[in-house]
Amino acid sequence: MTDDMASESPTVVNVPEKNRYVISAGGRELGFTEYTDRGAQRVFLHTEIDPAEEGHGYGSALMAGTLGQVRDAGLRAVPVCPFMVGYLQRHHEFDDVIDPVSISLRASLG
């Protein structure tokens, strides 16, 4: 991590035209989580953190920022992505906005 990035707190921004939330710091994208919307449910499909930035807590910051924005928007989060599933197993403060993955949803994602 560069000194510039260490001095700037990461920010999480929804980029709806790309169906993803992006975490960045120091003007550089550090990772993202992709989603698709199904009515009031935001279904999270995939998360990536830049391999050079792993181990700095950016994945957790991305999940917290994303789920906070989902809550603020009055939506429900459906974690299909294994990274988000793992995060939610350790962070129950977001249980109020989480919906389980239904069999029909999983089948439709094929």
Image (tube, grey):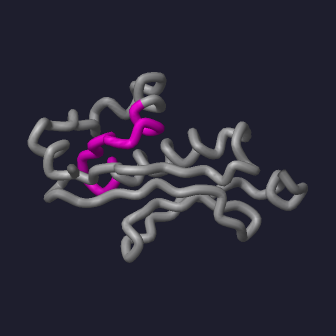
Q: Which residue does the image show at 32% across and 30% down from the upper left?
A: 95
Q: Which residue does the image show at 43% across and 38% down from the upper left?
A: 84
Residue 71 is situated, as x and y percent measured from the top left of the image, at 33, 48
**Relative to 51, is 55 above or below?**
above
Q: How many marks?
A: 0
- The quadrant holding residue 78 is top left
Residue at the extreme front: 110
**Relative to 91, is 70 above or below?**
below
Residue 97 is situated, as x and y percent measured from the top left of the image, at 28, 39
95 vs 106, nearest the viewer: 106
Residue 81 falls within the magenta-colored stretch: yes
Q: Which residue does the image show at 17% across and 55% down from the upper left?
A: 40
**Relative to 101, is 6 above or below?**
below
Residue 35 is situated, as x and y percent measured from the top left of the image, at 34, 57
Residue 102 is situated, as x and y percent measured from the top left of the image, at 14, 37
Q: Which residue does the image show at 30% across and 57% down from the upper left?
A: 73
Report the magenta residues as a range.
Answer: 71-85
Residue 44 falls within the magenta-colored stretch: no
Residue 42 relative to residue 29: left or right: left
50 vs 38, nearest the viewer: 50
